[in-house]
Amino acid sequence: MEKRTINNTDYIYGKNAITEALSKGGKRINKILISKGVINDTKINEIITLAKQNGIIFQFVPKERFNIYADVKHQGVVATTSPVEYTDFYEFLEHQKQKEGYSKIIIPDGVEDPHNLGAIIRTSACAGFDAVIIPSRRNAQVNATVEKTSAGAINHIPIIQVNSLGNAIDKLKDNDYWIIAADAHGKDNYFDVDYTNMNFAIIVGGEGTGVSKNNLKKSDFVVKIPMLRNFNSLNVSNAACAIIYESVRQELKT
């Protein structure tokens, strides 16, 4: 399976290579690009079926989109891939039940800047968090930029990709996790929550959009970082860092 790098994004190409990757679950595939000129192809139809089964996004694009791949035999289909294999959500939950102590998770919700995602992953790994959960849509995925910004931290903390954050949050709640969302209009200051006696997942929202309304409603706590000047808010990776390390501070005091 041949792989190259263009614009900091790894990819695999060709019908057989992508079919093979999908048949193994496609865990490293972020998105599949399909040329509009090969829509009625039998092998392409198989790729589409496998992509649907694995919950992987596919998109039909003009054939001109493939000009940057002109040096390879792409056959009208390219899959962008992650440099890390995503951890299975349900296997992670089962594993957490066996560990000592409480479980700590960070959830970026709509964080589209890969530099911010990389910084959040790096902070989470340094703080001993157990996983980072990202949605497969409307969020940056793990690519070479994220890998570089994280300074290799993507290899030291499980990264979980889910099709629906809402469903994942519901499942976390079913497994005794408390959900803590960061929002500028939160009821509590982030340092007023006791992080030491519970499994918890911290949700941080995307640049300019914040945590989605549905996920705010699912949260047990909605916390804010107080602003001492009349200014909008912190960068999402800085906000995540503040809350993550407040939980660390409390843990070290116990």
Image (tube, helix red, strand yellow):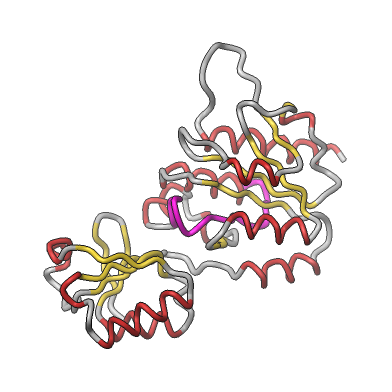
Outermost top residue: 229
* Location of residue 66 by image quarter: bottom left
Q: Position of residue 16 (x, y in %)?
A: 29, 86
- Please determine whether, in this image, residue 63 is positioned above or below residue 214: below
Residue at x-position 25% and y-position 70%: 34
Camera-nearest residue between 18 and 102: 18
Q: Is residue 137 magenta?
A: yes
Residue at x-position 55% and y-position 47%: 108
Q: Left or right: where does residue 36 sit relative to residue 23? A: left
Q: Is residue 68 visible?
A: yes
Quarter that holds the N terminus: bottom left
Q: Is residue 161 visible?
A: no
Q: Left or right: where does residue 113 sit relative to residue 246? A: left
Residue at x-position 67% and y-position 70%: 90
Q: Position of residue 162 (x, y in %)?
A: 55, 62
- Please determine whether, in this image, residue 97 is positioned above or below residue 200: below
Q: Is residue 70 magenta?
A: no
Camera-nearest residue between 9 and 205: 205
Camera-nearest residue between 123 and 70: 70
Quarter that holds the C terminus: top right
Q: Main secondary structure of the magenta part?
A: loop
Q: Position of residue 167 (x, y in %)?
A: 63, 59
Highlighted range, magenta: 126-141
Q: Left or right: where does residue 13 sit relative to residue 112? A: left
Q: Position of residue 117 (x, y in %)?
A: 48, 47
Q: Left or right: where does residue 154 sit relative to residue 73? A: right
- Please determine whether, in this image, residue 122 is positioned above or below residue 228: below
